[in-house]
Image (spheres, rainbow, N blue to C red):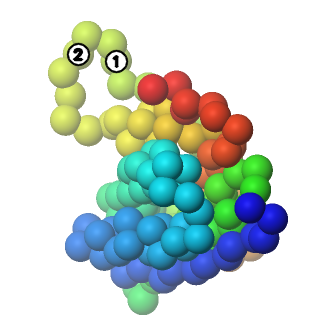
Amino acid sequence: MTSVTTATLRLAPDVLSTREIGPWLRTAMRHVDAETADALLSRMELAVHEVCMNVVDHAHLPADSVIELSLVLSSTDLTVWVRDRGAEFDLAAIPDPAEGVLQERGYGIKIARALVSELSYRRTRSGNELALRIDRGGRDGGL
């Protein structure tokens, strides 16, 4: 693959809207061979879904907010940026769930980190920006 694919998606900040993530990713990867697309899609869809659910549940978004997704697929990696206008947070301070303790919530960032090659956060003038990157060179994301 020598070209670069880009795509954007704006989601309402609710659970139902996160169902649009998979079809959006599949459309963006329509020119990639099936094996590569399947490997990237399964990991990125779940990682982006988990991050978006954290925005829905924890970002304290202002009225009329949206979650903005943008994607760049190159010959070396797939990167998705998730942007929102919610409250600032410290990604490094989010703890992993306690081992051996059953809990219903708190796994989203741990799952996303395990699925991608890199998960990073920065605060911009317009809000939060999380970048999720998967190398196409074969890193399995820790799973």
| SS under mark 1 | loop
Amino acid tagged 2: Val
| SS under mark 2 | loop
Q: Position of residue 49 (x, y in %)?
A: 39, 57
- Please tell me which residue lies in front, 49 or 65: 49
Identify the residue at image location x=70%, y=38%.
137
- Please tell me which residue lies in front, 72 or 75: 75
Q: In this view, does 20 lie to the left or right of 117?
A: left
Residue designated by label 2: 101
Residue designated by label 1: 98
Q: Is residue 16 left or right of residue 71?
A: left
Up/down of 131 relative to 99, above or below: below
Is residue 9 something that shows in the picture?
Answer: yes
Is residue 61 something that shows in the picture?
Answer: no
Q: In the rendered image, which quarter is residue 71 located in?
A: bottom right
The quadrant of the image that shows the C terminus is top left
Amino acid tagged 1: Ala
Q: Is residue 19 left or right of residue 81?
A: left
- Please tell me which residue lies in front, 77 or 115: 77
* Residue contact at pointers 1 and 2, CB within 8 angstroms: yes
Up/down of 115 relative to 41, above or below: above
Q: Where is residue 121 in the image (x, y as percent from the top left)?
A: 66, 51
Where residue 6 is drawn, which disc sits there?
none
